[in-house]
Structure formats: C-alpha cells, structure tokens
Image: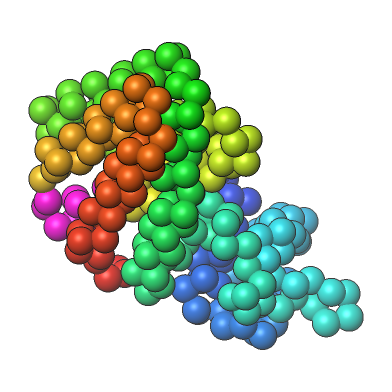
Amino acid sequence: MSSAPRGLHGALIHDLGRKIVGGAHPAGVALSLDGLCAEYQASRPTVREALRVLESKGLLKIRQSLGTRVQPVDQWNLLDADVVAWRLEGADRAQQVRELLQMRLAVEPVAAGLAAQVPDPSIVARLEAALAAMRTAADDGDLRAFTEADVEFHATLLSGCGNRMFPLLTVLVATALEAREQALTQHHVDLSVAALEQHGAVIAAIGRGDPETAEQQMRAMLRALQHEETPAGP
C-alpha cells in the first residue's frame, strides 16, 4: 500500500522509483544530479533528499567518489511498501503477486492458528465486524468497501495473534489485497460468495479454540487465490 506522492519531493521519489523498478534505469546506471534537477525542474536539495529516500529503499547507492548508481534487484528492500507497489505497476507484476501470496501462505495460516490457541473475544468480535462489512459491501457491489473491510480482517488477525512481528507485515497484505481489487476491476470479476464463507470458517475455528482447523481454513482461503487469473502488467 504505497503512499500517494505529496508535492514535488514525493512525486520525484514516486516517478524515479517507478522508473528504476520498471527497468528504465537499469542496474549500474549512473544518475546525474544536475540531469535530474533539469528533468524534474527541482532544486539540488530536493533531488538529493529524494535520492536519499530511494537509497534507503535499496534502489540506489550514493558515494561521493562514484556518484549515484542504480542497484541490482538483490539489493532492493523488497519488503518496502513502495517497492512492492512499483513492482505491481510494472512488468514484474505477476511475479510480485506470486511472491506476496507465498509470503501470506507462510504467515497468515500460522497467525490464525496462534489466534485460536487462546481465543480473545475482542479479536473475534473485530473479525466478525470486518466480515459483516465485507458482506454488506458484497451485497452493494462495492469492491472498494469490500477491500477495506478485508484489509481490516487480515490486519486484525495479524495484530491479534500474539506474535508482535506479524503486524509489521500488515502493509504488505494490504498491498496484496489492493492489487487483487485492481485485477478484479480490470477483468470485471464479481466478488465470490465462497470468499465470505472462507473468512467465516476461519472466525468460527478461532472462536471455538481450534488452532488446527483455523490454520487449515486460512490456508485453503489463500490457496483459492492461486486459481484466480493473474493479470499481466500494464
């Protein structure tokens, strides 16, 4: 879930980041400070700050003697929400979608099992409220509201499972869900009733303290996503 660009600084980061991730600036290419200033009609301090942000994401390496050079993919922070979003916008979209799903399969079933070990009524109530919002959105055909409620469901699960590291992945799960929303919109696919039933099955297993079933149901829910068509990049 990449943050929207704000002002020239944010727009510069977003545009240059997309170009690097998209391959317009291949690994090893040197970027000229003066050239970027001219291209974006920006001051040197503004461009420098944007380059430092992109360096923090692993896209660039800035050295006084070597200048600014684009880094190879294995140096990128692939867990950074902006990098993920930029990959989803380009030719790397299909691979990024697969990798996000693989990450979710590794984490979310475990989170569901942990949540069911010692069920917290307040967490169960929040999951039920999110599911109710998903049902309402599905009835209304409101895909945006459905996704927002779905994000709330999964964020609640990750934050309420007892593992303090899992909530750090919430932004990536949200990005994956928003990418799915875009794919469904592009392909004019209706929301699946089965998805609502799967969410309900996870809640039921958590509520009755059944970790094994909770984990199985969450894994089945995510496995179902593998059968959805993965659109090519724009």
Q: Residue at x 20, y 59 (%)?
A: 228
Q: Which residue occupies the extreme bottom position in the image?
A: 28
Please give the name of the residue rendered at 27% of the width and 46% of the height, measured from the top-left corner.
221
Residue 213 position, x and y percent, is 33, 38
**Lateral position of residue 193 relative to residue 165, left or right:** left
Camera-nearest residue between 148 and 6:
148
Is 170 placed left or right of 136 in the picture?
right
234 or 6, nearer to the observer: 234
> Horizontal and vertical percent for residue 109?
41, 45
Residue 111 visible in the snapshot: yes
- Residue 179's spot in the image, x, y percent? 33, 53
**232 left or right of 23?**
left
Q: Is residue 142 above or below residue 106?
A: above
- Magenta segment, which residues? 181-189
Q: Residue at point 54% right, 60% down?
A: 83
Quadrant in the picture for residue 131: top left
What residue do we see at 10% from left, 28% from top? 139
Q: Residue 135: x, y in percent?
A: 18, 27
Taking depth in this image into account, of 171 and 39 the one nearest to the observer is: 171
Q: Work out whether 198 lies above or below 27.
A: above
Quadrant of the snapshot with the C terminus = bottom left
